Structures are given as C-alpha cells and as structure tokens.
Amino acid sequence: MANDSAVGLHDLSFATTEFVLPHTVLAAEKGVDVGKYHKGIGQWSMSVAAADEDIVTMGAAAAAPIIERHGSDGIRTVIFATESSIDQSKAAGIYVHSLLGLPSATRVVELKQACYGATAALQFAVGLVRRDPAQRVLVIAADVSKYDLDSPGEATQGAAAVAMLVGAGPALVRIEEPSGVYTADVMDFWRPNYRDTALVEGQESIGAYLLAVEGSWKDYTEQGGRALDEFAAFCYHQPFTKMAYKAHRQLLNYCGHAVDEERVGRDLGLTTAYNSVVGNSYTASVYLALAALLDQADDLTGRRIGFLSYGSGSVAEFFAGTVVPGYREHLRTEAHREAIARREPVDYARYRALHEYALPADGGDHRAPAQTTGPYRLAALRGHKRVYETTGGGRGASRPSARTSTAG
Ligand code: CAA
C-alpha cells in the first residue's frame, strides 16, 4: 500500500537521440582494442544527437508520455536540470512547457550542478510536494555530453533525457529521508561559458567521485540513514558504467565489507543496461540506472534502493528510495527499449560531422537540417531565437509540424 504521506516518483520516462555510434566503430577508427571500451569502461555505444535535437527536444519527448498519462492537473512547477544548457538566461523548461501545452499557472526554472542537478531538482520537488501534497512537480533531466574529438573522454559521450513526475502517494518509488550530502571545490570536470565541450582531468575526476562517495555516505549515516545491507540495489551516477563498479567497491571497503564481486554484480548488475548503450547522459544518468533496474528486476516491491548522485566540481548526495507495491503496472519498459532500439547507427564520419556541427551565431534566419524522426525538433534559428516544432509522431512520422514554439 502506498503511504499517503509518502512522496516520490509517480512516473518516469526517458528519451534519447536519433543516432547511435557503436564502440566497435569508434575502436576501429581510433586503432584501440575494443576491449578497452567494452570491458575497461563498460560502454557499448553512445547516443548521438541529430542537428535538430537538443536538451529541449529530448526533454519534451521524455515528458510528453507523462502528461499524456496523467494530464497536467496539479503540476505547478517544472524543474529542468542540465549541464548542457542552450541559453544563459532563459530556462530550457519554458520551451518544453510550451511544446507540451502546460498551463500558464506554472513556475519553470532551470538548475545546474554538472551531473548532480537532477537530484537537487528531485529533492526540491519532494520539498514542494511536502508543503502542498495536492501539487505535483515535473522534473526533467536532459543532457548532451560532449568532449573534444580524439580526447580520452570522447568514448564516454552520450545523450538522453529523463522526465519524472514527483507527487504524494507515488506509484513507483517513495523517496526517503535522510539524505547524505557532500561538497568539495575541485576542478575535475568543468565547462567555461565559451566552450561547447567539457574540460576534464580524467583520473582526478575518478578520484574526486570516489571521495564524494565516501563523504556523502558518511553524512548519510551520521544523519541516521540505513545500513548498507538493507539495500537491494544501488543506482550510481554512471559517466561510464564501470565507474559504478569502482564506486560501489569503494563504498563496500569504506564500510568495512569484503569486496565480494558476486555481491557487487548483484547490487549493480541490472542498473547499467541503458547507460552502457546510451553513454553519459550527465544529470539523467542516475535515473536511467533506476529505469534499467525497475524495467529488468523480477520484483522489487518493498525493497530499498540506494542512490548515489555525483556532479563534478563537486556535489554528491546519497539517499534511499523504497519501491511501492504495484509499481510494475506503471513502468514504461517497452517504450524505453524502443527508444534505444530505434536509433539509427552512424559511421564515424557522420558522427564526426554531427560533433563538429555548430548552429549559426549570426542572428540570421536559418532552418535546421531536418534529421530527427522524434516527436519534437529544433526547426530554425530566427534572430537568435530558437524555434521548436512538434513533428506529429515518432520515427517515420511525417513532418512538418503541428505546433511551433519560440516559447516567448
Ligand atoms: N581490455 C580491457 N580493459 C582495458 C583495455 C583492454 N584492451 N585497455 C584498457 N583497459 C582498461 C584500463 O585498465 C582501465 O581500467 P581501470 O580503470 O580499471 O584501470 C580502463 O580500461 C580505462 O583505461 P584508461 O584509464 O587507460 O583510459 P583513458 O585514460 O583513456 O580514459 C577516462 C579513461 C579517464 C575515464 C576517460 O574516459 C575520461 O576522461 N572520461 C571523462 C571523465 C569521466 O567520465 N570521469 C568520471 C568521474 S567524473 C563524473 O562522474 C562526472 C561526469 O559525468 C563527467
């Protein structure tokens, strides 16, 4: 039975890109043994955004099925978390609000803290619902992860959006208190405003993540959190899926447990299925791990899940969720698998051209190349304004648009 005073995830849906680059193709191009990608970092392919896709089109595609199922009643807040923002001023969520036809009586805001932003959004949403349990909050986490071509980070790129409806009496997962939180001022990964690609100190970033695992767990236990053995599974931020394994071994060690690889596999094994083929979706990644777990596990009713969210720079949070009875009736497993299966494989040259593609910055009138077959697309830039359109459906659906938006 869902506890009425409980607050948490009522629905969860994700979307990714039009294109995909398999790591076999990347390995052949770079002259790297593909084992480095498959085994070394645990990645098999990366989602590649079309020229007319971005955090808005993915965010709207992730959120639309939630609005279709639940309507917009009670949604008075939309929080959009991202590292790969498209505007220094305007919240990306306003474009999504417009594309989805949400009511004007809504507050929309954008949140940033590298890959941690979605967890801040979720916690703020829980707080808003506790203040007024009649309200629901739409949390959207969307990112296009981009490193320099030929850099070590290139193999860990990816893109996806997760939308989560947060409310009282949740149908999927109750979010528990306390949280363990941790902040340390480190330059492990950052992106100055004048750059499209992130800068990263690769090995330092791994060390910073591991320290943050310890710090947030330490605070979690000091705040009266649960013991490690009470958790059935752990959803970690997965910049590459092997990072979750490194993090979990660190946590077991820190807690004085022997590192038993069978246990590590049991605790994490089902959480990596989507991230290993999507790549790093930054702030969406920990919730893609949750989607993969819920979509694949036999039955998690009443079981506890540990969440470890890490955002470089750095901020981390450990918290727990309890899976609600009946949750399986509300999952979107088929749609999630379709979002991954529908991507069109590209060769290295096409991927590279997409990576190098930059929107014109001259303020002129420019149509965006029509590439995506997803439900929303960036149609044009006009006088420095982005124009989005609804395409009328999924892959193969005919264009052009039913509705266009500059969202102001
Ligand atoms: N077969 C099997 N394994 C192989 C192999 C082969 N042929 N060749 C190499 N490997 C293994 C290596 O032994 C290594 O494993 P361990 O980490 O267990 O030692 C692994 O493959 C990777 O090899 P390298 O360390 O040599 O790889 P690299 O230096 O080229 O790049 C990286 C690795 C630093 C993670 C790089 O991909 C990178 O910079 N990524 C971006 C930064 C990142 O993701 N950091 C994670 C923490 S920060 C964070 O989480 C926030 C965020 O989202 C960015």
Image: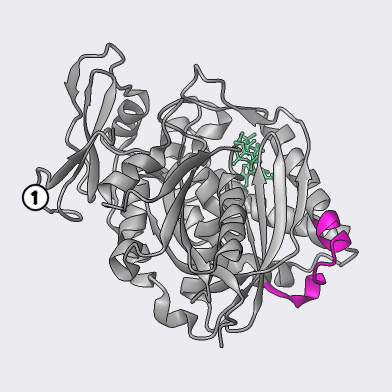
Q: How is the image coloured?
A: one colour
Residue 185 placed where, x, y %? 77, 31
Q: How many labels were placed on the picture?
A: 1
Report the span colored magenta: 217-232
Q: Quadrant of the C terminus?
A: top left
Q: Is residue 360 magenta?
A: no
Classify the position of ligand 1 by quadrant: top left, top right, bottom left or bottom right: top right
Where, by quadrant of the figure, is residue 331 drawn? bottom left
- Which residue is drawn at the image coordinates 67% and 70% (left, top)? 267
Answer few, some or many: residues within 10 Å of disc 1's Cα (few below 14, many 20 plus, some between 14 and 19). few
Front residue of 258/177: it is 177
Side (left or right) of 19 relative to 297: left
- Which residue is drawn at the image coordinates 32% and 40% (left, top)? 95
Q: Quadrant of the N terminus?
A: bottom right
Side (left or right) of 73 relative to 284: left
* SS category of the residue bearing label 1: loop
Residue 18 placed where, x, y %? 28, 46
| Residue 17 in sight in this render | no
Side (left or right) of 204 relative to 346: right
User: What residue would you read off at disc 1?
Assistant: 398
Instruction: Check the image and name the residue furthest to the bottom.
Output: 1
Residue 150 placed where, x, y %? 49, 25
Mark 1 belongs to which amino acid?
Answer: Ser
Residue 157 placed where, x, y %? 48, 39
Where, by quadrant of the figure, is residue 380 drawn? top left
Side (left or right) of 276 relative to 334: right
* 314 over 284 or under it: above or below: above
Front residue of 1/375: it is 1
